[in-house]
Image (cartoon, rainbow, N blue to C red):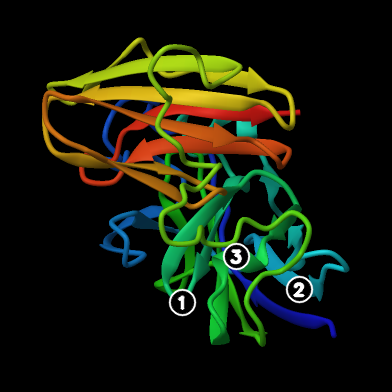
Amino acid sequence: MLLTVATAAGCGEPATTHHKPGTTHQQASGNVGTLLSTDDGAGHRLREVAAEGAPQVQLAVRPDSEDGWNLQLTVRNFRFTPDSVGGAALPGTGHAHLELDKRKIARLYGPWFHLPASQVPKGAHTLTVRLYADDHTAWAVAGKPVEVAVPLTASTPATGGHSHPAPAPGQSDPAQDSPPRGGPAADRTVTIAVRDGKVSPAPGRTELKRGERVALRVTSDRDDTLHVHGYDKELPLPAGREAALVLTVDRSGLFEVETHESGLVLTQLLVR
């Protein structure tokens, strides 16, 4: 079955100030459109532009033959700019957020995304895609964000070949194991420290091959939560103690690693 819905919204003129990786998601002001006092419901302020020439987005959802669904975004007056995320708000550029029942599950940097069945509980749901500028403000028209919503019904839990079903009692999740003592449990290790609202080393991209395991070792000076977008993996970060998450990257794309409370970008996982 094919579900398609369309809606319209934003564009502007020159660049604004930056939101850079490693800083909070405090929104920048500038000359592109009008920065409104209202937000998207998740703390990202709306950047309103005229309806004429504004970005538009359509979303098509198709069941995958092995597992979950394949999502296709069709955009007009808009282009994805993954290399510029965290930079200035430029006319008709940026990225998208994917939400399931108003809960963000991924940031999208292109027109295709595979949604595993393991991320969708059984029952009726709503998928929402919203367009954002590179500075993380949400493009808007007439006071409303540029977004599209479609219904999605999951009839059975995940059983497909690439899903990650919940582990049985007493077993660990192979995609989220703490590294065992006595030896490495990952192909790559990324060590990150968060102190006084700053990330060290400065956030960059960690390039990985599909199927590799990456260990994220994070120490924060305050209680927080680590979130890997696209994989929907979370890890508590107790203040002053190193926490480790080992993840098998089994899908290609660009996935951000962020903290929930402080809203910091820690790194980006580029999986080829």
Residue at 77% x, 80% y: name it.
4
Give whichever of 59, 79 is nearer the camera. 59
The numbered mark, 1 or 2, whose residue comes first in the sequence reads: 2
Whole-percent x, y for residue 195 in the image:
16, 20
Query: Quadrant of the image for the N terminus?
Result: bottom right
Whole-percent x, y for residue 100 in the image:
51, 71
Residue at 64% x, 19% y: name it.
207
Whole-percent x, y for residue 130 in the image:
54, 63
| Label 1 crowd bin: few (<14), some (14–19), many (20+), radius 10 Å | some
Residue identified by numbered label 3: 118
What whole-number distance in Å separates the C-alpha atoms at marks 1 and 2?
15 Å
Look at the image and tell me whether residue 14 can be seen. no
Look at the image and tell me whether residue 108 can be seen. yes
Residue reaching furthest right? 65
Whole-percent x, y for residue 133 in the image:
51, 46
Relative placement, left or right, of 25 versus 246 is left
Residue identified by numbered label 1: 101
The numbered mark, 3 or 2, whose residue comes first in the sequence reads: 2
Which label is found at residue 201? none
Residue at 21% x, 45% y: name it.
261
Residue identified by numbered label 2: 61
Residue at 69% x, 30% y: name it.
271
